[in-house]
Amino acid sequence: RGTSNANKRPLRLLTSTTALAFRPCCILAVGLFLQIDCLCNSSSPLPSSVVSAFTPPLVTSRLHVRCLHRQQAKKRQEQEQQQERLTNLRVPELKDKLRALGLKVGGRKSELIERLESHHTSTSTTGRSSMPPSKRKQTADASATGIASSSDNEAEAFASSKQKAPAKPPKKKKKKAKAADHQRQTERTDIPKLWDGDAATEQSGSYTMKIMSWNVAGLRALLKNHPDALPSLARDHGLDVIALQEIKLQESHVTDPKLKIGGHLLEEEGYDGHYSCSTTKKGYSGTAVFVKRRTRSADGVDAAAKSKKQATLSSFFKADAGNGGSDGGAEKNAARDVGNIGNVDVANLIPTVSYGIGKEKHDGEGRSITLDFPLFTMTNLYVPNSGQKLERLSYRTKEWDADLLAYMQKKEKERNVPVIWLGDLNVAHTAKETWNEGAKHLVKSAGTTPEERASFDQQLDAGYVDAFRELHPDALGHYSYWSQRAGNREPNKGLRLDYFVCSQDLLEDSNESQVVVRDSYMIPDQKGSDHCPLVLELEIKC
């Protein structure tokens, strides 16, 4: 105030000069702010043309590269976290997720995880590709390099001024020479039907007896999930004996009226049931047999109609001579031992039942039931598994196998008839009994160890025969067990663990032979267990 216009001119000049000096700095600062906001925030309202007008091309190029690398690092971190979450899930949980997405659930855990990752990346809204993480990283790095190289001349000049050495291409890892691949036998070859029982009955009057063996992996689970499995098998195949292993029952389950097992299971189909349950460990092991009821009396009346149900607990577990597991033992046996089927005496189709192999250290687990038919002896077995860590390998090979062989030899000698032992023997004897013979882990896996195979060899060398392999020596891909956890049933990646082992005499057909093994085969399409049923056909001549 009070100053002249002349005194105001220097102040105006200073103000104009200062504004001109700071104007480029202000523009650059605003441009940097807008550029960072636009690159790091995809929802920025400003168009790129406005932002680029405030920012020099060199700064734009370098900011693009830095922000892209930051985004890539964030994506890689998210992918690693996703992969870690999937790795921590168990196989059943992974399969549940795949089922919910409508994807294939078979394969190993690593394959399940890769399948889920591929699905997540392909359906992601971020535009990520469905290739594996390692490939995505390489592609992203290549994209970043492409953006940097496509910048304008100022960016190239800036990069050259740094005089950085060009990035060296990654060294290729030398691939180790693979060992010889193991066998992969998954194709099931055709085998011929060797016997026609109906034709034999018409021609010679003989009777074809059919015996089925099946590890059901829990009888209650089978009856709950596949209630028609056993009745259908009995009817469709005309079975005389049904031998089950790993029933996992306690004696209280057999007599429980709610479960309808004892006195109910296969009753309408005309079978008598016998059960051997583990007493040393509940819900473990166990075997059962069902024998076709032969009850034709002298006057033609069906004696089974008079006493269908077994009334007492001892009826199921104690073997009275010829009682077939039903009450009224001696009277019923005397009434039904009359009549013929063709030229065959019905009495030859009625067994005496006993339990165990005569050794307390084995018999507490309910692993064996023996049927003494007049013309032969058969024993239903669930042989102990050696365990995941082979903790029972020594017990299995040095004690159980040796005692079993001694028991069967004793039966054969005392009764002077051939013997058969059958069931889940928990050994894949030769290369033809495994789909992946030669795989390194087999020598340390239960059922395929050299010790178990050698022990089975000793049993066969004592004068016994693997019926299926004897009748079908060139058959391949005929397995009886598949891992459900690995989803191996559909591709037929299995093992043959179930057998009929017979006296050599049963394979020899002569005029003196009364019983001859005619055929043996699997029923691989039968569901309900991780094992499938197998059948033995015997010709009874008298």
Image (cartoon, rainbow, N blue to C red):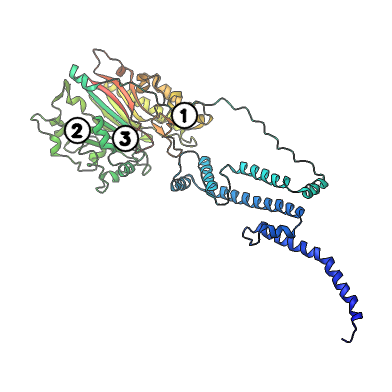
- The residue that appears at 53% across and 42% down in the rendered structure is 114
- The residue that appears at 59% across and 49% down in the rendered structure is 79
CA gap between label 3 and label 1 equals: 23 Å
Under circle 3, the secondary element is: strand
Residue 165 relative to residue 459: left or right: right
Looking at the picture, which amino acid does disc 2 mark?
Arg
Q: Is residue 506 above or below residue 319?
A: above
Under circle 1, the secondary element is: loop
Instruction: Give the position of the C terminus as an image quadrant.
Output: top left
Under circle 2, the secondary element is: loop
In the image, 88 versus 323, the foreground residue is 88
Identify the residue under disc 3.
Answer: 244
Please report whichever mark, 2 or 3, sits nearer to the chain's N-terminal start: 3
Looking at the picture, which amino acid does disc 3 mark?
Leu
Looking at the picture, which amino acid does disc 1 mark?
Thr
Badge 1 crowding class, 10 Å Cα cut-off, few under 14, some 14 to 19, many 20 or more, is: many
Kindly check if marks 3 and 1 are in contact, taking CB atoms under 8 A apart as contact.
no
**In the picture, residue 452 is in which quadrant?**
top left
Residue 360 is marked as none
**In the picture, residue 466 is in which quadrant?**
top left
Residue 448 is marked as 1
Kindly check if marks 2 and 3 are in contact, taking CB atoms under 8 A apart as contact.
no
Residue 293 is marked as 2
